[in-house]
Amino acid sequence: MRGMSLIVQVMAGLLAGMLFLYGGYIILHGHLTPGGGFAGGVLVAAALILISLSFGSVEQVERRRYILSSVFESLGGVFFLALALAGYFAADIFFRNTGVFYLGKPLQLVSGGLIPLANIAIGMKVGAGLFAIFLALGASRFVMKE
Amino acid sequence: MVELYILLGVMLAAALVASETKNLLAAAVALGLVGFSVAIMFILVQAPDLAIVQIVVETLTVVLFTAVILRTTEIDTTASGGLKMETAMFIAAFLAFGGLFLSLIIGVFRELPVFGQPLMRLATDYIQFGLERTGAANIVAAIILDFRGYDTLGEATVLFTAVVGVLTVMRFVTKKKPGGS
């Protein structure tokens, strides 16, 4: 797809990094403050889509992003399932948290055991999944084939 | 609590108007009345965040409907006048089934806790032991990822299926065109 004007590109370059950082913050603090994997994942996907739309790309780059995003999407799903199965194999309970994962002190960043890890998995899944859907629906290798 | 019932009556009347009137603009306005009544109800039961979302969504919906109606036609020409035999039978069957359902469900409603009672039986346990059993300060995260982790796994599966579906369909489209790389 074609890129946009210089003004848009400069603004997008300034914004996208902060958006990405904020998405990561929301995902990592999901067990402490409102937010979590889904909201943070949407922010990350928004940053990626912003860069993609404003700077444009050639077909090779899009193909690589397309493959990478679907790989990350599947990795997130596998990670989430692995967390659930870890509890199952360690204590015979699906999604077991206490006794399997490190619970830590409440209100600290490293606490909550399974919950932050699951948030990261869901964040990967949602961010990569939405970006993959965007690439599939809007990228030029599908549109410019006419 | 009586305001809620008044609003409920307004909503029922507006919904009837929206489904029965032939003027589509009036139908759109009546539909908006239903949505804004829901927003006022949210404010009355002290959920302002939901009320804001509801107002935004409802305004957008009414604007969209109005834009479509202004560009097409204002009078619904497909609706047929008069009561047909078939329609009358449908209405009778609906009334009979509704009456039966209501009479059966009255017993169930007697068993429910009082409307607006702050804590449900299950939620009491979650709120009381959430922090100590999961170590997560955010009670919502504790519920959706620990107590109800299985539900979240199902949600993730739904998202995965949606992504796989979109990618499959779009790949199919590109493959059909000849000369693609």
Image (tube, coloured by chain):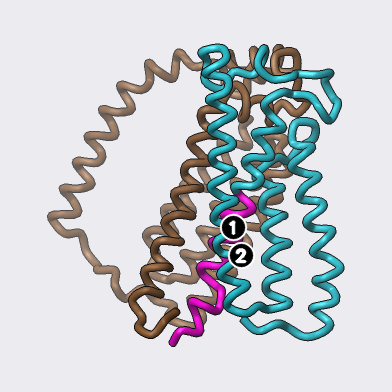
Chain colours: A cyan, B brown
Figure check: A143 above or below A78: below
> Gap between marks 1 and 2, in whole Å?
6 Å
Q: Position of residue A11 (x, y in %)?
A: 84, 73
Chain of residue at mark 2: A
Q: Which residues are magenta?
A: A126-146
Mainly helix, strand or loop, the magenta region?
Answer: helix
Q: Neighbour class for label 1 at 10 Å: few (<14), some, many (≥20)?
A: many
* Residue bearing mark 1: A69
Chain of residue at mark 1: A
Count of marks, rendered view: 2
Q: Is residue A132 magenta?
A: yes
Looking at the figure, which quarter contains the N terminus of chain A? Answer: bottom right
Query: Is there CB contact under 8 Å for labels 1 and 2?
Result: yes
- Which residue is drawn at the image coordinates 61% and 49% (left, top)? A126
- Give, as a three-letter code, the residue at label 2: Arg
* Residue bearing mark 2: A65
- Give, as a three-letter code, the residue at label 1: Ser
